[in-house]
Image: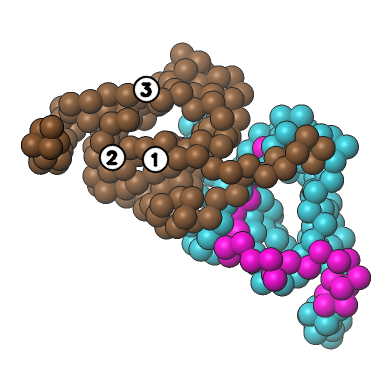
Chain colours: A cyan, B brown
Amino acid sequence: MIKNCKLLSFRELGNAELGYLTPLEIGEDIPFAVNRIYYISDVPFTACRGFHSHRKLEQVLICVKGNVKIRIKTYLEEDIVELNNSNYGLYIGNMVWREMFDFSEDAVLLVFASEHYDESDYIKDYNIYLEESKEYFKIVYENDEREV
Amino acid sequence: MIKNCKLLSFRELGNAELGYLTPLEIGEDIPFAVNRIYYISDVPFTACRGFHSHRKLEQVLICVKGNVKIRIKTYLEEDIVELNNSNYGLYIGNMVWREMFDFSEDAVLLVFASEHYDESDYIKDYNIYLEESKEYFKIVYENDEREV
């Protein structure tokens, strides 16, 4: 997985007779205080969303129904993660570019964010993102090289 | 609506080309700090869940996919609310008995709670609930009578 991202797994409680419940304790299962929550649905399969990074905000993305693919990038690395199980969450830290695509017809993508809405925290221009990403991650990747 | 409960409505952003996003700012759209989140799915239509009250915890329930019915009760009143639209949330305050039933096959019920999991906050015995509910709501209903 690329820098500043990780896959989280959650426990599921229940059975076929009563259904299934996934509990998330904030500060434990979700590694930050949640200030904003949103959910996305009814996205056509051909549509792509996202196309931005956050300077500060952290998120956890959970596909609670259906499936969706998430492309996550820094200036040096790229991963595509398919979310197709509500017991996994994709943690996306700050300064990571994200794109969401291949939403299944029934997909519901649930997102928890560490900050309230703040327009100034978004980087929506990919060239500006690349500049700020190089600056931000340079030391991280340089440290990696030293460790090799 | 019965005491200690209310229906919340949320704004939805988007269009048919890109899909729809419902943003919830914690402390504004959700009237408490969120310490626990859970989601329930794959509940058979014949199953009923809930059958408890909380002494202190407050919740908001949102059906982000499909539909479900929620029975909410105090010792004096009862309502059944059908959640079938992800832009509505049912706020359930403390000391309200709740039962969830008639889950559609595709239903995903998302719940935000004001407290971390605490077994001692649950009242699961309906007779004990009735006793505590009478004590808790007595003054509320008596004040209502005076106002009539």
Chain part drawn in magenta: A108-133
On screen, residue A113 versus residue B123, left or right, reads right
Q: Which residue is mark 1?
A: B91
Q: Identify the disc placed on residue A75.
A: none
| Marks 1 and 3 share the same chain | yes
Judging from the image, mark 1 belongs to the subunit labelled B
- Quadrant placement of the C terminus of chain A: bottom right
**Is residue A37 among the parts visible in the rendering?**
yes
Dot 3: what SS? Answer: strand
Closer to us: A24 or B136: B136
Judging from the image, mark 2 belongs to the subunit labelled B
Question: First in sequence: mark 3 or mark 2?
Answer: 2
Q: Residue at x 57, y 35 (%)?
A: B86
Three-letter residue code for mark 2: Asn
A11 over B129 or under it: above or below: below
Res B73 quadrant in image: top left
- Quadrant placement of the N terminus of chain A: bottom right
The x and y percentages for residue A95 are 75, 70
Q: Which residue is mark 2?
A: B4
Q: Is residue A23 magenta?
A: no
Q: Which residue is mark 3?
A: B80
Q: Residue at x 39, y 40 (%)?
A: B91
Three-letter residue code for mark 1: Tyr
| Marks 1 and 2 share the same chain | yes
Dot 2: what SS? Answer: loop
